Amino acid sequence: MLMRTWGLLGSGSGSGSGSGSPLQLLGFSLRRPLRSSRVCIKHRLDILRSSPFSSSSPPSTDPSHPARPRTMSAPTPSPLSLASSIPLSSGYPMPRLGLGVYLNDDPAPACAAAFAAGYRHVDSALFYHNEAGVGQAVRESGIPRAELFITSKVYSGRHGYEEAKEAVEESLANFGFNYLDLYLIHDPLSGKHRRLETWRALVEKQKEGKLRTIGVSNYGPRHLEEIRAAGLPTPAVNQLELHPWCQQKPIVEYCNAHGIVVEAYTPLTRGKHFTDPVLAGICKAHNKLPAQVLIRWSLQHGFVPLPKSADPERVKANAQLYDFELTAEEMTALDGCDGGEEGALTWNPVNAP
């Protein structure tokens, strides 16, 4: 099987260094791994974490996506429901709960379970190599495309103006769609010049109507400030690792101050903290699962959580969140679990140069 060039950090960071990218220095291959080898990705990206190291175009008149005013992702009061959405600066609403499909080579069962449970939001990425599977699940669901919110991302191995435009077209072809609801820069690891060129490419694709909303992922305040200083539209969304043990407070504060909605990946901590005494006590008080309490914490903070599961029953259970509410004392107790950057469980490249 042919392997495709990737390089999450990319080899053109804009620094002009000839000593190899930081990714190469950490022992990463600059070629995309075969599916069978992707189990190694998490281990190597965890190494990276420990290393030293808009105004958007006018929204469509599509009645299924009515224009909404610009907002900040401030804490949201109840009542919440599975139908709840948050308005984006592009004028489109985004469902408050999404299904993550990272490392899911066959996302159809999870997507089918999600759609049956009432989800209308799926988060994929070019790097996940499952856009086609998500697109097929959408068609098989029978749900009108306009009622669904589908996200993808371009990773740093495909950054640059022309490369990113080609990546968008590749994603659209993979899904079998003529537009995407949200497209993100997956990471900031390609260096300032290529980051900005990639953002310019997404702005152009948004103007063409191929992307309804554009945003970023794993961006820290410095990366976001680069966009502002260049006079380019502000991202509508920033997707981060976010849970009580890694709250990314400086980034969240920046996003709240600039009208950028915050999405939360790894909201369930991959189960690592399910036995934490604070979390266990809250679960007992509400007779709820740890995953349900953690997603509820995220929702009540105004975030858009993206819990990931390939198990249809867990996908369904992760949406059973709307018959209880965490008290102010419970929210404060979970807020007190924050470990800052040391609490991150994934690559979390928010401080990339």
Image (cartoon, helix red, strand yellow):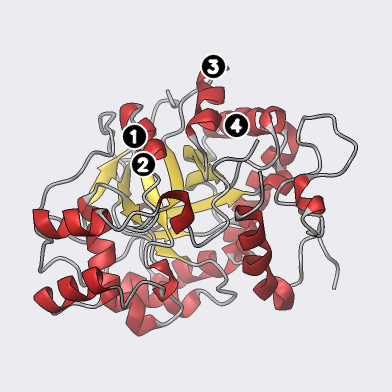
Alpha-carbon span between mark 2 and mark 3:
22 Å
> What residue does disc 3 label?
229
Q: Residue at x 34, y 70 (%)?
A: 115
Say which of 107 and 327 sits in front.
327
Gap in Å between the C-alphas at discs 1 and 2? 6 Å
Residue type, mark 4 in image = Trp
Q: Secondary structure at mark 4?
A: helix
Judge depth for marks 3 and 1 and give the one in front: 1
- Secondary structure at badge 2 equals helix
Horizontally, residue 286 falls left or right of residue 314, namely: left
Real-space Cα distance between discs 4 and 1? 22 Å
The numbered mark, 4 or 1, whose residue comes first in the sequence reads 4
At label 3, the amino acid type is: Ala
Identify which amino acid the numbered label 1 is placed on: Glu
**Who comes first in sequence, dot 3 or dot 1?**
3
Q: Position of residue 193 (x, y in %)?
A: 71, 27
> Secondary structure under badge 3?
helix
Which sits in the foreground, 118 or 138? 118
Above or below: residue 136 compared with residue 74: below
Residue 187 x/y as whole percent: 60, 45
Label 4 belongs to which residue? 199
Residue 331 at x, y percent in the picture = 17, 56
Front: mark 2 or 4: 2
Badge 1 is on which residue? 253
The quadrant holding residue 73 is: top left
- Mark 2 and mark 4: Cα distance apart in space: 24 Å
